Image (spheres, rainbow, N blue to C red):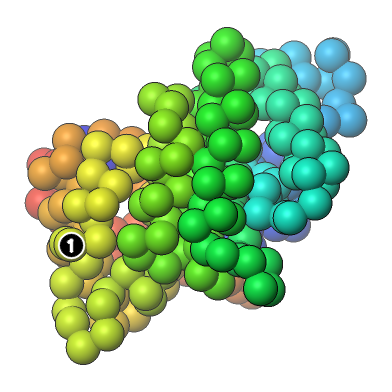
Amino acid sequence: MLQLGIVTYNIAKDWDLPTILKKLEALGYGGVELRTTHKHGVEVGLSADARREVRKRFEDSPVQLVGLGSAFEYQSPDPAEVRRQIEATKEYVRLAHDVGALGVKVRPNGIPRGEDPETVFRRIGAALHEIGEDAEGQGIEIRVEVHGPGTSEWPGFARIIRHADHPNVGVCWNSNPQDVPKGGTSIADNYKLVAGKVRTVHLRDLTDEAYPWRELFQLLVADGFEGFTMAEIPDSPDPDRVLSYFRALWLAYQPEEKAR
């Protein structure tokens, strides 16, 4: 069954944690990915007591902490920078464990100028393998967002996941325009490249008719996906109304008995 949540980038970036939990429960959203640097303040600097408090808030709420959303990336040609990003990710993984999150979102962010793409794909994949192995020991899933110029293109992104080669490294489908091949209308061929590996889904504006939303939901259901599809949409002066409309569209794009 598909589940509905939000990413706090950007529509809830100014909400504190009690506000997030109260609003999402009232609006019929079951989960949240907390994006780093936003007002909720769930960051690696939290004390042990503060981490326990975050965990308790979610345990007392019907809203699930689906994951923490980071901006860690591993494409740099500088080995010291890649190592810094890896170690920072491991710290964030421990935060996720402490607050009761299910996973951590990371990303590639492009191909450095002048570098061979395959070399970059292998470098990112190797970093992801190490992180995935470390996070597995913490009970935390690593979700790789389809992101960045060159690294969000298919099948290059699929090669990154292949090089990562770890069962604890999955995909955050990002609903990018390039999912649809030029001159085409279907995302099926690109989805097949990561079928069985999708762990979370970021959804954009569901009124965008250029993206085949109904097909995406059908592919997810056929793939046995039972996780969260999450609204990652712009801020609004009337966020409650926007999120209510978003949920209505989300329900309309899939068989009702398959959604909750």
Q: Is residue 23 above or below residue 47?
A: below
Q: Position of residue 243 (x, y in %)?
A: 46, 61
User: Can residue 118 be seen?
Assistant: yes
Q: Position of residue 110 (x, y in %)?
A: 60, 65
Residue at x 52% of width, y 52% of height: 121
Quadrant of residue 224 within the rendered picture: top left
Which of the pair 169/49 is nearer the observer? 169
Q: Is residue 81 left or right of residue 111?
A: right
The answer to whether 96 is drawn above or below residue 107 in the figure is: above
Q: Position of residue 64 (x, y in %)?
A: 49, 30
- Answer left or right for 6 relative to 197: right
Depth check, front residue: 132 or 75: 75
Quadrant where the N terminus sits is: top left
Residue 105, quarter of picture:
top right
- Element under disc 1: helix
User: In this rendering, is residue 18 above or below 229?
Assistant: above
In x, y percent, where is residue 87? 78, 30
Q: Is residue 254 left or right of residue 142?
A: left
Please give left or right for residue 80 compared with residue 82 in the image.
Answer: right
Quadrant location of the C terminus? top left
State whether residue 92 is above or below residue 249: above
Q: In the image, what residue occupies the spot 84% across and 13% down? A: 49
The amino acid on which the numbered mark 1 sits, given as a three-letter code, is Asp
Q: What residue does disc 1 label?
A: 189
